Image (cartoon, grey):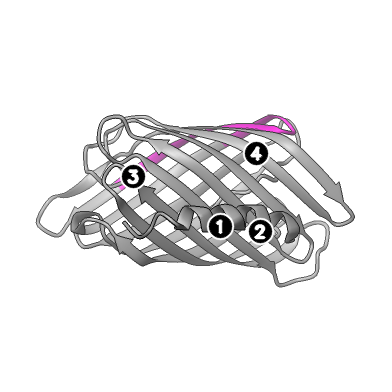
Amino acid sequence: MQNQPWLVVLLLLLMGSIQSTAQGPPITTDKPIMLGANNWIIKSLTEIRKTDRGTFVKAPLMIHYLPTSNSLVAVHLPLVTYNFQDGGSGQTLGDVELLAKYQFYRKDGMGKTFRMVAKTLQTLPTGKALDIDGISTGNYHGYLGIVAGYESIKYGISNELGFNLSPSNDLDEFRYKLGFGLPLLPSVYPVKQINLYFEYQNSWYPVIDEFMLLYAQGIQYAKGRVTVEASIQFPLVQDISEVERRKFSVFLGTRYVF
């Protein structure tokens, strides 16, 4: 396979981002910046995914809590709507996700910060066996990753590198995400900001030797404790089986901090 060198390139990008320097949380990627202790975050990021097999919607209720300023635990409860082109439609509970993050490195400067976070995402087999990756598979997945990011009041870069274990099938995955954020308004407090996001996801499935590269273009408005956002994601490369191929996804999100 010709795609394996991408891992080396992405690792170099991960290291290079330390030398680089968005406001607000990314949309389809993650960031290591955390809020203060005892904060709750209620959010949702609905995905409307169009594929060769049909249209699928995942609308999760995401409840996040920060026990300390450098740790986070969360549960994601997804409602899934499916409509297959060859027949079959309905609504069901998707795969419930349990998230935990721990910030183990932080270095602050004047108007800038670099941080690193370890994270795990445990996907429980609560969903219907629709075989739609990331929405509802009815299979267990265990993900471990590292998130690193450098952010200033001018712009920021976030990186995530991890491995998703799928013991019930051959879809073990090395995953790398890279996100660039660009604030369009001057930094003020309370927060009032419009952000543009440019986000990439690389997925390599070593057992079946397949590869996928996705790109998402998003916009976000944050004011005080409320954030609203929208993004469209489409494939740049899909060296995967036809049944897994995507056309595009639309993401619509909200978030409230209290």
Residue at image x 46%, y 58%? 6
Whether residues under marks 4 and 3 lie with C-beta atoms below 8 angstroms apart, the answer is: no
Residue 258 seen: no
Please tell me whether mark 3 or mark 1 is closer to you in this view.
3
Give the labeled residue for mark 2.
Answer: 157
Tell me which segment is drawn in magenta. Answer: 64-80
Q: Report the residue that reaches farthest toward the right.
A: 110
Amino acid carrying label 2: it is: Ile
Q: CA distance from mark 3 to mark 2?
A: 27 Å
Would you call the spot at circle 4 few (<14 residues within 10 Å), some (14-19), or many (20 or more)?
many
Give the labeled residue for mark 1.
Answer: 178
Residue at image x 61%, y 44%? 147
Does residue 200 lie above or below 96 as drawn? Answer: below
Which SS type dominates the magenta stretch? Answer: strand
Would you call the spot at circle 1 few (<14 residues within 10 Å), some (14-19), or many (20 or more)?
many
Amino acid carrying label 4: it is: Val
Q: CA distance from mark 4 to mark 1?
A: 15 Å
Would you call the spot at circle 3 few (<14 residues within 10 Å), some (14-19), or many (20 or more)?
some
Please tell me whether mark 4 or mark 3 is closer to you in this view.
3
Whether residues under marks 2 and 1 lie with C-beta atoms below 8 angstroms apart, the answer is: yes
Amino acid carrying label 3: it is: Pro
Residue 122 located left or right of residue 117: left
Residue 59 seen: yes
Q: Quadrant of residue 151?
A: bottom right
Q: Quadrant of residue 257?
A: top right
Residue 158 located left or right of residue 86: right
Give coordinates of residue 258: x percent, y percent. 69, 40
Residue at image x 57%, y 52%? 11
Closer to the chain start, of discs 4 and 1, is 4
Q: Secondary structure at mark 4?
A: strand
Give the labeled residue for mark 3.
Answer: 206
